[in-house]
């Protein structure tokens, strides 16, 4: 920005797809001299200067500042500072990051497994924002750097017009660009609901992506048959009489097959569409799930890039509501209201076809996303261990008895330590949150902990007993 005498005269964009921004302002140097003279401290400094530090002569004539019509340029006036909301920062920042990575990588676009849930929909919205920004910049200057990079990514740079002059193609709309660079696929199973498939399809249409809906049951069945053939045993979900180990294994194989399928499609979809190159796979695990470890190692959280890996679930939902209005993606309102679900277990008896799945993330995790956000900030930013976190949460959560706060803290630290190893292979993410659990870059703490936390949990139990005894005495 350009500031004169404490007044902001010009401000560059905080987020932009251009490599360089140039801003200008016209300043009256007499105003600067007058302003400095009005401040006593500047006068004292000037009186103490040694000789030879006076004015610097300049050979440039004052007349050269005049315009061609012999008028003086207008002095720039003060402007109001532009501040982005947190929702805008969550969208514009990762959008610029993705564009910079895409154009530098030589890839032909992105591939996103789109489940119809809030996280993958947030990633799709961010890419949609990227296409809006790139399209606008390319249309404003078809010969500029952004337009040139856009043609390169879309494989349009080598095309010529009929008169053999270079074709300065630019996308006519953000949807046209999205159809070229964003490939979304709903990877359903027999456990998926029609509601999430419908939301994924409608969001793909709203953004303009190249969208597919596929079923991966045939692959899941083939792997289970192979396991049964080798071991003579067939795993079952817990709702059908299986153990928890069987249940988790059946959930995880669905998730991991989606990762393998994603990379297959990312490598071959450009060939299917008659284009060259490859696609970058986008992940969609938010910071809270990474902190809690609520993800399958090497599932769709394993990708090339993750634009939301350091953004909390609650911030993502607020961003989706903003995106619904900003980009006219009306289906996002419906996605925000839907309960988060992995859809990896069979639907419960009585669930109606077309309704949302009965399995929910918060029920599986044993804690809410709001609670996870509090745990994350206290663990990373405040560097709290179990005991100090219990102390702080007893004050923050006065509506809960100490015993319940203790149970929540213990549950968090158990799963935090149990799943910490997953952070060692987490996908590179846009750094937007101070409590990012990405240990490769932002969180260098150990990844092997004693999951029992014997000493700390015993100390918490003693504190709970003291608090409860004190309450009874009062």
Image: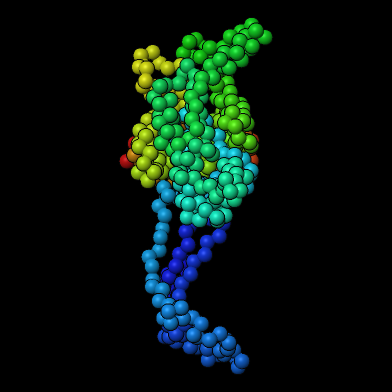
Residue farthest toward the right in the current orientation of the protein: 230
Q: Residue at x 55, y 21 (%)?
A: 254
Name the side, left or right, on which 451 lies relative to 3.
right
Q: Residue at x 35, y 17 (%)?
A: 352
Q: Nearer the viewer, residue 206 or 61?
A: 61
Q: Residue at x 48, y 69 (%)?
A: 24
Q: Is residue 184 above or below residue 378?
A: above
Residue farthest toward the front in the current orientation of the protein: 163
Quadrant where the C terminus sits is top left
Residue 392: x and y in percent read: 44, 45
Colour style of the rendered protein structure = rainbow
Q: Is residue 412 above or below residue 225?
A: below
Q: Nearer the viewer, residue 415 or 323?
A: 323
Residue farthest toward the top in the current orientation of the protein: 232
The count of marks equals 0
> Can I make out residue 146 in this image?
yes
Residue 176: x and y in percent read: 47, 40
Residue 322: x and y in percent read: 37, 44
Choose top left, top right, bottom left or bottom right for residue 262.
top right
Choose top left, top right, bottom left or bottom right for residue 425.
top right
Q: Nearer the viewer, residue 4 or 62?
A: 62
Q: Residue at x 40, y 52 (%)?
A: 85
> Can I make out residue 418 in this image?
no
Residue 222: x and y in percent read: 60, 13
Name the side, left or right, on which 55 lies relative to 320.
right
Q: Nearer the viewer, residue 308 or 102?
A: 102
């Amino acid at each position: 920005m350009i500031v004169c005498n404490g007044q902001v005269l010009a401000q560059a964009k905080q987020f932009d797809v251009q490599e360089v921004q140039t801003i200008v302002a016209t300043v009256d140097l007499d105003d600067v001299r007058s302003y400095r003279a009005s401040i006593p401290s500047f006068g004292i400094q000037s009186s103490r200067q040694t000789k030879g530090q006076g004015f610097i002569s300049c050979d440039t004539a004052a007349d050269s500042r005049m315009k061609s019509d012999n008028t003086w340029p207008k002095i720039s006036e003060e402007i109001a500072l532009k501040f982005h909301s947190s929702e805008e920062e969550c969208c514009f920042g990762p959008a610029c990051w993705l564009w910079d990575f895409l154009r530098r990588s030589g890839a032909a676009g992105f591939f996103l497994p789109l489940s119809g849930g809030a996280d993958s929909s947030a990633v799709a919205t961010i890419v949609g924002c990227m296409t809006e920004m790139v399209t606008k910049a390319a249309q404003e200057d078809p010969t500029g750097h952004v337009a040139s990079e856009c043609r390169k990514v879309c494989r349009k740079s080598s095309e010529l017009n009929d008169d053999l002059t270079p074709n300065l193609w630019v996308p006519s709309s953000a949807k046209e660009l999205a159809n070229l660079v964003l490939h979304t696929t709903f990877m359903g199973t027999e456990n998926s609901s029609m509601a999430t498939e419908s939301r994924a399809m409608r969001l793909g249409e709203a953004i303009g992506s190249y969208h597919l809906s596929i079923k991966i049951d045939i692959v899941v069945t083939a792997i289970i048959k192979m396991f049964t053939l080798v071991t003579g045993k067939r795993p079952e979900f817990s709702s059908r009489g299986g153990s928890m180990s069987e249940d988790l294994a059946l959930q995880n194989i669905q998730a991991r097959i989606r990762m393998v399928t994603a990379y297959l499609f990312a490598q071959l979809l450009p060939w299917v569409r008659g284009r060259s190159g490859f696609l970058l796979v986008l992940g969609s695990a938010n910071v809270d799930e990474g902190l809690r470890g609520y993800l399958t190692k090497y599932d769709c959280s394993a990708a090339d890039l993750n634009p939301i890996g350091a953004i909390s679930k609650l911030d993502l939902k607020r961003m989706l509501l903003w995106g619904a209005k900003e980009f006219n993606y009306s289906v996002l309102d419906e996605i925000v209201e839907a309960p988060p679900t992995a859809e990896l277990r069979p639907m419960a008896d009585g669930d109606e076809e077309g309704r949302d799945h009965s399995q929910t993330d918060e029920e599986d995790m044993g804690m809410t996303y709001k609670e996870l956000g509090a745990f994350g900030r206290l663990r990373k930013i405040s560097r709290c261990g179990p005991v100090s976190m219990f102390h702080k949460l007893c004050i923050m959560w006065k509506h809960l008895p100490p015993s319940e706060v203790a149970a929540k803290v213990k549950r968090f630290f158990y799963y935090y330590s149990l799943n910490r190893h997953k952070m060692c292979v987490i996908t590179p993410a846009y750094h937007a949150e101070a409590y990012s659990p990405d240990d490769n870059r932002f969180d260098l703490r150990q990844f092997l902990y004693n999951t029992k936390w014997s000493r700390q949990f015993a100390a918490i139990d003693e504190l709970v007993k003291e608090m409860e005894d004190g309450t009874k005495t009062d």
